[in-house]
Amino acid sequence: MNQPIRLSGYTRFNFAMGILHGVFYQAGLAISSPTTVLPVFLSHFTGSLALIGLFSAVVTAGGVLPQLVVAHRLEGRARTKPVLVVAIWIRAGAWAVLGVLTWFCTGCGPVFTLISLLVLLLVFSTAGGVANVPFMNLWGKTLPVGLRGRFWGHRQLWGGLLAVGSGWAVKTVLASPIAFPRNYALLFIFSFLLMAFSYIALSSVREPEGDVSPERPPFRSYIAGAFGLFRSDRDFAWFSLTQVATMFFAFAMPFYVLYGKNRLGMPAEEVGVLIAAQMIGGIVSNLLWGWLSDRFGNRSVIRLTAAATVIMPALALLAHHSGWSLLIAVFAISGVIISGSGIGFVNYVLEIAPEPQRPTYIALNGTLNGLFALLPIAGGWVVDITSYHVAFWISLGIAVAALLLSVRLKCLRSSAPPLD
């Protein structure tokens, strides 16, 4: 019988600080979300959807491109937290500047505003890409395997609940008599304050020294060796294939709501019901995913998440016969998938990676995740030239492949000892 793991005071402190960071960071990001608030703000300065899409692409690309460069620099360091601290406070500073600039520059022209916002978003997202590698490495070093599931689960659970409150705050500020653009400036400043509080908590996490690679090769050799891991580490290669196939659910994700509205007669005001279903699905499932991860391993979380990706497009196809209300279940399951992916795949990488090479594994995984942002573009192209149903059938086929691939994943552990 497994003996309980007794947690040190440092571990308990780091766990608490990590939860505070996750909760307040999610709330802060929700107030100035790059996918909701910022596009509306941008629409006041340009009517070009392509230009607004460019800003979204900048957020994605900035978060992906630096990761392998950072991993190359960090594999020779016993402590990586100093890089993390610098990067997160640069991120906070970018949002503070955005808030102040928006408040005082009420008469600035659209060109100046758009260029300033583009630069600040690039700084924010690039600093996030730099921070991701030491951030994930930090939790791989400081939290035992049997605690990581609950850690990410609680971050997502309470952060999601506070993000709901952030949505109410956004509605209140934008409905207030405060004139544009100062109403958005207030949102950006509130976002900065919440992020700053979260970064104070993250900056206080205590990092132990870790094992490092004996020597750091030139960058070109390092990149070749990093991508060579897909050949030399078959377990990591199977994991990466499984993740790509599972995350393919994003291919059709933006089109379920349009399918309901344009094909199934769903009233426009019911979109809020679908969003609520997605949030509830994610919030409720977080604790289940965390418990499964800690007690039975992350392979079980990944397999069940892959199974959920099969159910989602299947229900959407059935909605053609039963009506749009079945899309409520589709969106609830999408929340379950997002939460399961955020726990299962993240923890599997931390567990499978050898400690000296953990930054490289994290960076490869982060770079791969960046490609998922392109999937809705391909999905939209398929819908345009064929139909919604074809996109859903493609999503269903890849989901079945993901479930089959998940069977091949290496079992890193069947259970974890209980924590005292």
Image: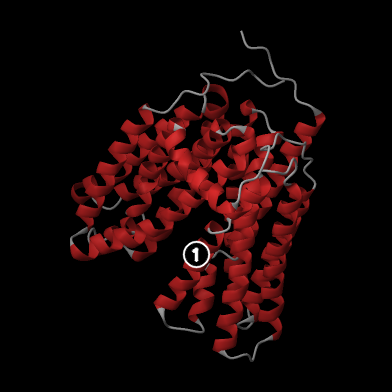
Residue 272, image x and y in percent? 43, 59
Residue 248, image x and y in percent? 36, 48
How many numbered callouts? 1
Along the line of sight, which residue is nearer the eye, 26 or 247? 247
The colour scheme is: secondary structure
For badge 1, the amino acid type reads Thr
Give the vertical position of 71 relative to 141 (above or below): below
Dividing the image into 4 quarters, which one contains the N terminus?
top right
Residue 62, image x and y in percent? 55, 63
Give me the residue at 63% from left, 65% from top. Answer: 124
Give me the residue at 62% from left, 83% from top. Answer: 179
Give me the residue at 78% from left, 53% from top. Answer: 200
List the residue tagged with mark 1. 35
Q: Disc 1 on helix, strand or loop?
A: loop
Dividing the image into 4 quarters, which one contains the C terminus?
top right
Along the line of sight, which residue is nearer the eye, 164 or 335? 335
Q: Is residue 37 left or right of residue 187?
A: left
**In the figure, residue 186 lies in which quadrant?**
bottom right
Q: Is residue 60 left or right of residue 81?
A: left
Answer few, some or many: residues within 10 Å of disc 1's Cα (few below 14, many 20 plus, some between 14 and 19).
Answer: few
Furthest-top residue in this view: 1
Give the vertical position of 235 relative to 113 (above or below): above
Task: Mark yes or no: residue 281 visible.
Answer: no
Q: Is residue 120 left or right of residue 407?
A: right
Q: Is residue 268 left or right of residue 208?
A: left
**In the figure, residue 30 lies in which quadrant?**
bottom right
Residue 338, image x and y in percent? 46, 45
Task: Mark yes or no: residue 83 visible.
Answer: yes
Along the line of sight, which residue is nearer the eye, 176 or 60? 60
